[in-house]
Amino acid sequence: KMSSGAADLRQRKKQNCTESDKMAPEERNKENSKLGRSPKYMLIQRFAKLFFGCLAAVTSGMMYAVYLSTYHERKFWFSSRQELEREITFQGDSAIYYSFYKELLKAPSFERGVYELTHNNKTVSLKTINAVQQMTLYPELIASVLYQASGSEEVIEPVYFYIGIVFGLQGIYVTALFVTSWVMSGTWLAGMLTVAWFIINRTDTTRIDYSIPSRENWALPYFACQVAALTGYLKKNLNCSAEKFCYLLVNASTYTFMMMWEYSHYLLFVQAVSLFLLDSFALAQTEKVYEVYRIYLFSVIVGYLLQFENSALLVSPLLSLVVALMLSKSLQMNMKKSTFVSRLLKIMYIYLVLTVAVTLNFLLKMFIPHKENGHLLKFIEVKLGLNTTKNFTMNWLLCQESLQAPSQDFFLRLTQSSLLPFYILVLIICLFSVTQVIFRRICGEPLKETVKLEDGRIGERPEIVYHVIHTILLGCLAMCLEGMKYLWTPYVCMLAAFGVCSPELWMTLFKWLRLKAVHPILLALILSMAVPTIIGFSLWKEFFPRIMTELTELQEFYDPDTVELMTWIKRQAPVAAVFAGSPQLMGVIKLCTGWMVSSLPLYNDDDLLKRNENIYQIYSKRSAEDIYKILTSYKANFLVIEDSICNEVGPVRGCRVKDLLDIANGHVVCEEGDNYAYSKYGRFCHEIKMNYSPYVNYFTRVYWNRSYFVYRINTVISFQS
């Protein structure tokens, strides 16, 4: 029965494709004859529109990539720097990602390089890690293969090739947003406005300025391509070839996105929830939605296998939701009929899906051993005020700007560029229209097969409803965590640009207002051209001079103290030495020198988090003996103390590293509402600089400059004064 049902479904899909392919030309011919236009004229017109639209989309992406490259050069003077000075521009986790790319290129063969990364014991002391799995190094694997296979060794330096790929992906990102807005509105003017808003609000749309090798910069362009393809796939009356193309693109981009970012399944979960709500209200073709669910399912399976049996994917909320939806599908048989039973089934269906998903996720976590970010749940508890903690790592994460609520400056910047006001306008109109459609569906009124401009029913288009739900969900996350704005703001640009350029949106508004003085269709067409044109000219006048100033103004990024430190390590430190210090500095030391370190700036491994917390004790009020025992337990030979952390004067008291350590160690005393740090020992990073016993017995200073103090950890301890 199941096989015959599947065959019927495939046959029905084939018939629908054939019918739409046959009906589309007939409808176009009728319309053309009414307007007195020949089919040949219309074909040329459509081809010209498609050609110039694609040209504009590709040109926008290429210009944005060139803009990023030029801005990067002006900011860092990259071409005039030595290799060491270039590498110092990679900070924190970015340094670690790029260091593994360097190691792959230095390996005698690609296979040997991959083996050394999957059995890596030369990065973190006393620890063998699978770097490919733990740090999601597939972007570096691909970049190294492309660099060597393309014969680029004699043409371009590895660092330029690497950042060139990332900038090229950002160009694809912008092109995908352009296409999405174009597909939704029907005019590539919306795509141009999307790109303009994206670049003007670059501070809030991308982190490319601060962290080029970060996983999201590699992954989000593929997600944008997936969203563009999904937008086309959800459209009604799509011809068969276009539907197949969109389906294949959704497949390919989803698989790639899953491999590029360890947190990709969370973003796909948000998308799956959007599709679930879209389908629950019977606003899209169920067959199409379930095809996307199957893509999710296969993506998780492929990701699990290629990521060395990554159990985090098996316990992910995405897999639980998709399996629950598949199991609950039988209840949807008669849901789209306007009967009392179907409405009751709809409520039961939503309840059943949520119940099965939560239960399944709970059972999977019980029976499948996994290393999913356990600190993530604790963080959410503390963030929501459900719990309190003195844990250093948890409080340090809570103090990070990206994990706090967005500031007023964020909303002010979006308002100044006119993005936020137009987004709110478009969102309100679409939401009201969707609510009307849902109410009509509850009352038993069927959806129209084709929505015409004069109908003023923009809420009946499934791709529009999907984007409305998607941006609302992402917006809710962005209101809680500022770092989520990089996922939300690009789609705010896209939705706002689509709205102001869409005659259907203006027509929907005029239908409510019941305009009689002016013909509403004519006015909608005029406004869909006039409003974006006015917005474009105002943005050009206000922001174009600023962008040109950015590109012409020479900035200077130079850190002589860090350059001197790395030079000293490469010249003076033994090859087998292990360095200890802040995780961010250890990442740079690993990249620039290749020496082994005791910790890394990574926050997805419990052991590394514990290491980071222990080594950060060099900035706490603990004894020299305690610090010595901690460092020697990780086989560290050299200790690097940063003056910027030791003498940190942060804007928020209580969020400095030394404050968080005092709280975790119980060295804080509260008196009359004020907090005071108290311990029988002085702060280690201050006391060690005094060169008196017992500090000189355990540590010997071997190098220092204005920013860094390097101490050798003595193997033979003398307690003579």
Image: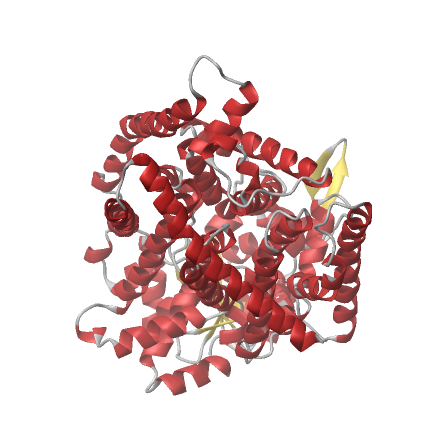
Residue at left 61%, top 37%? 434
289 left or right of 71 in image: right
Of the pair 648 and 450, the residue shown nearer to us: 450
Q: Position of residue 73 (x, y in %)?
A: 24, 51
From the viewer's perspective, is 320 left or right of 505? right
**Residue 466, image x, y percentages:** 56, 47
| Image spot of residue 324 (x, y percent) | 72, 63
The answer to whether residue 201 is above or below residue 664 is above
> Which image quarter is the C terminus in?
bottom right
Left or right of 563 in this view: 284: right
Q: How many marks?
A: 0
Residue 402 vs 630, above or below: the answer is above
At which x and y percent is residue 662? 67, 50
Left or right position of 698 against 66? right
Front-most of residues 265 and 441: 441
Q: Residue furthest top?
A: 517
Q: Nearer the viewer, residue 175 or 265?
A: 175
At 53% from the left edge and 45% from the top edge, which residue is drawn?
467
Relative to 702, residue 641 above or below: above
- Residue lying furthest left: 155
- The answer to whether residue 284 shows anywhere in this view is yes
Q: Which of the image's four quarters has the N terminus?
A: bottom right
Residue 602 at least partly seen: no
Q: What's the colour scheme?
A: secondary structure
- Residue at 44% across / 64% down in the picture? 244
Whether 179 is drawn above or below 97: the answer is: above
